[in-house]
Image (cartoon, rainbow, N blue to C red):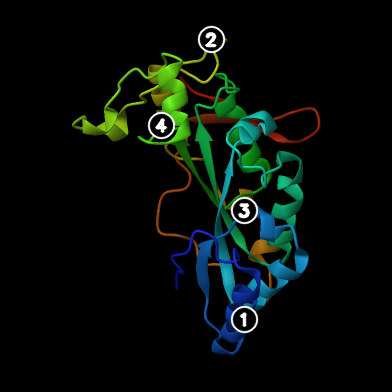
Amino acid sequence: MMFNDDNIIGNPSYSKELLKALIPLKKRWFSQASLTGLKNVENVELLAKSGCNALLIGFESLSKPNLIRSQKYQNDPAEYREIIRTLHRFGIAICGSFIFGFDEDDPSVFEETVSFAIQTKLFTAIFMILTPYPGTAFYHRVKNEGRLVQDRWWLLEKPEDFSPTSSNEDGHGGTSGGLEKGLERLQFVPFHLETVSLELLSHPGQPIRLLPFSVDAAPVHEEKDPGGQTKVQMKQ
């Protein structure tokens, strides 16, 4: 069962009432949640008791400056790993969402993000390009900076295949072509079964059902760094 809610625990008092009411129903469900509420272990425990066995979480970026400029102050990369470990401890799988094309991004962002997803044993991940939607502050900023390559990009025949912005004055943020190429190489993240948290799979109260799509077709080469962490090298 899925709750179509951008943040299932966004309203603390209502969400607690909802989650407690779900416990006796013994349903298994999936939704989305902000990192703000997931910093509280009691919230995570209640999510698990209510039957939540997976959450979509918008991590967005591993760069704090990117997040601050985007005014997503609730996200702190320094806290990501602990939050993920807590969710796994309570048997909740994670679908992580990430965005490429921020001003602090450079070509290394693709491999760094995939390595993070594998190291933290995310169940799956979604990668997207930062997009200047009309009427937003970001749209007006890149337009004023002369970085809006295609002003009315949403009228293109296939706007989803086009990145309408170019890099900033320092060469970061990616180029319209570089972002698409980088994203194409990340169509499938190499989440083999052994990369999923063993703690998650063995959790007694949360049986995990593998999702019906390919999870082992990524064009990458995996290797271990000196500290034993999994790193990946994108294949060209």
Q: Quadrant of the N terminus?
A: bottom left
Closer to the chain start, of discs 2 and 4, is: 4
Q: Residues within 10 Å of mark 3 (few under 14, many from 20)?
A: many
Name the spot of residue 212 as percent of width and height, x first: 40, 59
Residue marked by disc 3: 196
Residue highlighted by disc 1: 17
Kind of residue sitting beneath label 1: Glu
Q: Earlier in the sequence, mark 2 or mark 3?
A: 2
The amino acid on which the numbered mark 4 sits, given as a three-letter code, is Pro
- Label 2 SS: loop
Q: On the picture, is 54 further left or further right than 41?
A: left
Measure the alpha-carbon separation of dots 1 and 2: 50 Å
Seen in the picture, residue 46 relative to 141 is either above or below; the reply is below
SS for tag 3? loop
Q: Nearer the viewer, mark 4 or mark 3?
A: 4
**Nearer to me, 81 or 131:** 131
- From where the camera sits, is residue 186 visible? no
Crowd around label 4: few <14 · some 14–19 · many ≥20 (10 Å): many
**Amino acid type for the residue under numbered disc 2:** Glu
Q: Is residue 232 left or right of residue 185?
A: right
Tell me: residue 28, above or below residue 202: below
Name the element at disc 4.
loop
* Residue drawn at 67 percent across, 29 percent down: 65
Task: Name the spot of residue 98 as percent of width and height, x first.
Answer: 53, 40
Q: Is residue 73 left or right of residue 171?
A: right
Whether residue 172 is visible here, answered yes or no, is yes
Q: Amino acid at mark 3?
A: Val
Q: Nearer the viewer, mark 2 or mark 3?
A: 2
Residue 156 numbered mark, or none: none
